[in-house]
Amino acid sequence: MTTVDLPLLPLGRGTDLSAERGVECPGDLPAASDPGLVARAQAAKEALGDRVFVLGHHYQRDEVIQFADVTGDSFKLARDAAARPEAEFIVFCGVHFMAESADILTGPEQKVILPDLAAGCSMADMARLRQVEDAWDALTEAGIADSVVPVTYMNSSADIKAFCGRNGGAVCTSSNAEVALEWAFDQKPDAKVLFLPDQHLGRNTAVLKMGLTLDDCVVWDPHRPHGGLTAEQLRDAKMILWKGHCSVHGRFSPAVVDELRATIPDVQILVHPECQHEVVLKADLVGSTEFIIKTIEAAPAGSSWAIGTELNLVKRLAAAHPDKHIAFLDKTVCYCSTMNRIDLPHFVWAMESLVAGTVVNQIEVDPETERWAQVALQRMLDLPGRSHKD
Ligand code: SF4
């Protein structure tokens, strides 16, 4: 087999091919310094009324999230969009794969808009369809493809979700990864899982929740011949982890955990399962974004926390809970740079364009991809007995 040499997509994918990614936007954006931006955003939202439904991911900037009709993680927002069939336009203040999921779960007449097409996700971009098909060929050559169930994290492109749908697999979120893996291992005798694209969520779930060992896991590196693995290693593995990670959560380190424990008395370390295994092992609590929010809401006054997730959310939690001591689990700034592409000028531009009757930056998943991605999403929705909140 050959390795696939694909161009990097550092800041986006798909439809902004002519742009140096992240630099241009196909429209006249208001200046970021325009003091009237807030009033313009409000006016556009009022003019559109119920025709528009604005979704705001937890990691968005304050300047944008103030205009969201609902806030949440990616899966909650896609479901919220699906529950608003009367909204003609869904303006998704998040990243590209989230807008794709919203397009898949909403009606054909609803239009999903991403205010900046350069708002991609580095983790989602680490698993490209051609690379995954290449890996699947290697599994076939090793004689094990029939026993492999592909499971992809919600944070993946629609074509990777569709790949999982076509090949008997499913989607999972960070809060139902355990039940999704249980389901996957029940699908076939001697089942193995190909987990895409976040190696950390896959490893943390397999080892800490499913009782597998680190030796049961191998990492498929799409940039090395044969994934950097022998056929024997593939045959011996229970979990084949894709070599992808979140550039935000992957930054947190065990050394900073030790440092904070030494400096903040009784601090509790609360992290997202996209963090490295060594960080998760040192944490007190691990869970999805929604879990992190609920944990802080329920925490007693005076308690101390160091949180390992995106900085916009941590800052908002600290502001909302001044009676608790909330620190960030990194010494440097750690925003999601692609999430932060959605700023007020892009939001105003997208909204005012809608008021003027022009749909800009619409995210459309082709029908065949949508059909199979829907199959993988439905398998997740059919998982037994768990909340599917991310
Ligand atoms: S926080 Fe990580 S997983 Fe989420 S959009 Fe940013 S890069 Fe992707």
Image (tube, rainbow, N blue to C red):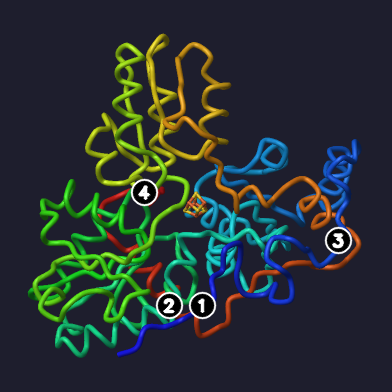
Residue 386 in the image: state x and y as whole percent: 29, 50
Residue 296 in the image: state x and y as whole percent: 42, 25
Q: Amino acid at mark 3?
A: Ser
Sooner in the amino-acid sequence: mark 1 or mark 4: 4
Closer to the eye: label 2 or 4:
4
Sooner in the amino-acid sequence: mark 2 or mark 3: 2
Using the numbered discs, state the Cα–Cα distance from disc 3 to disc 1 in whole angstroms: 27 Å
Question: What residue is pinned by disc 1?
Answer: 370
Using the numbered discs, state the Cα–Cα distance from disc 1 to disc 4 in whole angstroms: 26 Å
For the residue labelled by badge 1, is the local secondary structure a helix, a strand or a loop?
helix
Sooner in the amino-acid sequence: mark 3 or mark 4: 4
Question: What residue is pinned by disc 2?
Answer: 162
Q: Amino acid at mark 4?
A: Glu
Closer to the eye: label 3 or 4:
4
Sooner in the amino-acid sequence: mark 2 or mark 4: 2
Residue 353's label in the rendered image is: 3
Q: Quadrant of residue 92?
A: bottom right
Residue 296 vertical placement versus 206 (above, below): above
